[in-house]
Amino acid sequence: MCSSDLLPSAVYYCFLGQITVWLISIFGTTSSIANVGALGRIAMFLTIFTILCNTLVVPRFARLPDNKSLLLHRFLQIQGSLLFLSAFTIAMSYLFSAQALWILGPNYSDLNTELLLNIVGACLGLISGVSFSLSTSRGWVINPAYSIPASLISVTAGIVLIDVSSLKGILIFNIFISLIHALIFVIYGLVKIRNSK
């Protein structure tokens, strides 16, 4: 793995993670910032699955032999499991949104749609993060000369196409960016597997 390729991307994605808060601080209101922070606390439970994947799944994937069919099979199994987990989490958030918002307090009881949008974005972030970890564990690092401009283009397109002045708009923007990153890392992983021996 080339650290000179990984470092710029890692630094860039650290800053990108805060873009939702930055956009709300520029275009939104203080209540929007409070709402995003509160909803983010509920989505934090997904970090448990990120830690489990990085502890249990990613090292096993890294140790697999360079067998194209085996790598593809395991990669698709992992992606399928992440999709199932995401669908289950989104369904539970939809069915029990009132109970989840009750935990946050009465000031947040009317954020059912926003909670669902936040969970969708968090699930896409989970898929993106795990896919990135799977690739880098095998030494497959996207050249930052391609990944950073692609990410900047998607951010710019999202700002132009989506009304980021409302809380829903910010959460939809977050979904858009997370979806683009998930697609980039999943497709990159598939291409690297296809090109392996």
Image (cartoon, grey):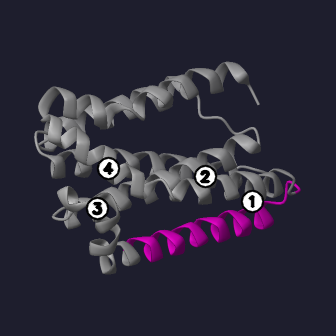
Q: Foreground residue, 132 or 50? A: 50
CA distance for labels 4 and 2? 24 Å
CA distance for labels 4 and 3? 10 Å
Q: Which residue is mark 2?
A: 130
Q: Amino acid at mark 2?
A: Val
- Are the two marked residues, 4 and 3, in contact with CB atoms closer than 8 angstroms? no
CA distance for labels 2 and 1? 9 Å
Residue 151 at x, y percent in the picture: 39, 34
Give the mark nearer the N terminus: 4 vs 2: 4
Q: Nearer the viewer, mark 3 or mark 2?
A: 3
Q: Nearer the viewer, mark 1 or mark 3?
A: 3
CA distance for labels 1 and 4? 30 Å
Q: Which residue is mark 1?
A: 57
Q: Is residue 37 visible?
A: yes
Q: Secondary structure at mark 4?
A: helix
Q: Quadrant of residue 137?
A: top right
Q: Nearer the viewer, mark 4 or mark 2?
A: 4
Q: Which residue is mark 4?
A: 38
Q: Amino acid at mark 1?
A: Val
Chain part drawn in magenta: 65-90
Residue 172 at x, y percent in the picture: 24, 52
Q: Residues within 10 Å of mark 4 (few under 14, many from 20)?
A: some
Q: Is residue 197 visible?
A: no
Which disc, if any, is residue 115?
3
How many marks can you see?
4
- Are the two marked residues, 2 and 1, in contact with CB atoms closer than 8 angstroms? yes
